[in-house]
Amino acid sequence: MKLVVLANDVLKEELLAQGLPANALMEWISDPAYFSRHSDADAFIDLLFNNDPARVDLLNSKPSIPVIINYVTGTLQELPSQFVRINAWTTFLKRPVVEAAAKDAMIKDKATAIFSAFGKTTNWVPDVPGFISARIISMIINEAYFSLEEEVSIKEDIDIAMKTGTNYPYGPFEWSEKIGLENILALLTELNKEQPRYQPAPGLIKEAVH
């Protein structure tokens, strides 16, 4: 099995957190243009995906194989049928469970086998913006910003309270730095189109755009 993967150093480490697949040839690339050079690939994995037509065309160069993309904010609605969305926001991919969505049953089976080779199980969820975990974490981070604005506490103490009180691996502000506030804001903005409860906190918006 040949897997062609586009990733940065952090996401590469997280993808391999449970070990290197024994039955796979890994081809790590640094530019999406290189996907089209691997006609013998069994799957493409784009952990730095952005949804522009040129990128989609590159990934769609071999329609019979799974194309696994790190695409949290959008959905598969307008993407080719072999595309598989996963939540690979920083810190999420290193878990032994991958949150994913797919349209095609055969592609889903192939993707499940690929992640199994990485020592990960696949949690198939509805194809909605944010999946499940990213929605929840984004709201926790958003609420932390509201609490900060209301002077409930300071960032450091809110982080400590969440880690010690809920046993979260990171506090909300610490987590937002790892994920990237711009990603949190993009998801909240998308979700807010349908639900007012996802309205981003003013402080979060201010920090995300500066």
Image: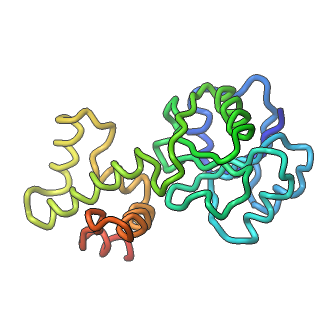
**Which residue is found at the position 61% from the left and 25% from the top?**
119
Q: Quadrant of residue 24?
A: top right
Q: Quadrant of the N terminus?
A: top right
Residue 24 placement, left or right of 75: right
For this rendering, which residue is in front, 172 or 121?
121
Of residues 162 and 115, the one nearer the viewer is 115
Residue 142 occupies which quadrant of the picture? bottom left
Total labels: the figure holds 0
Seen in the picture, residue 179 relative to 92 is either above or below; the reply is below
**From what the image shows, is residue 164 above or below residue 155?**
above
Q: Residue at x 90, y 55 (%)?
A: 37
Q: Which of 59/162 is in front?
A: 59
Q: Is residue 77 above or below residue 124?
A: below
Q: Position of residue 9 (x, y in %)?
A: 61, 48
Taking the image as shown, residue 149 lies to the left or right of residue 105, namely left
Colouring chosen for the image of the structure: rainbow
User: Horizontal placement of 161 versus 135: left or right?
Assistant: left
Please name the residue shown 59% across and 52% down the image: 70
Pick the front one: 21 or 142: 142
Relative to 5, does residue 139 appear above or below in the rendering?
below
In percent of width and height, residue 118 lies at 65, 29
Apparent side of residue 115 relative to residue 44 in the rendered image (left or right): left
Q: Position of residue 189 (x, y in %)?
A: 39, 69
Q: Which quarter of the image is occupied by the C terminus? A: bottom left
- Residue found 51% across the figure and 46% down from its top: 126
Residue 194, position as x, y percentages in the image: 37, 67
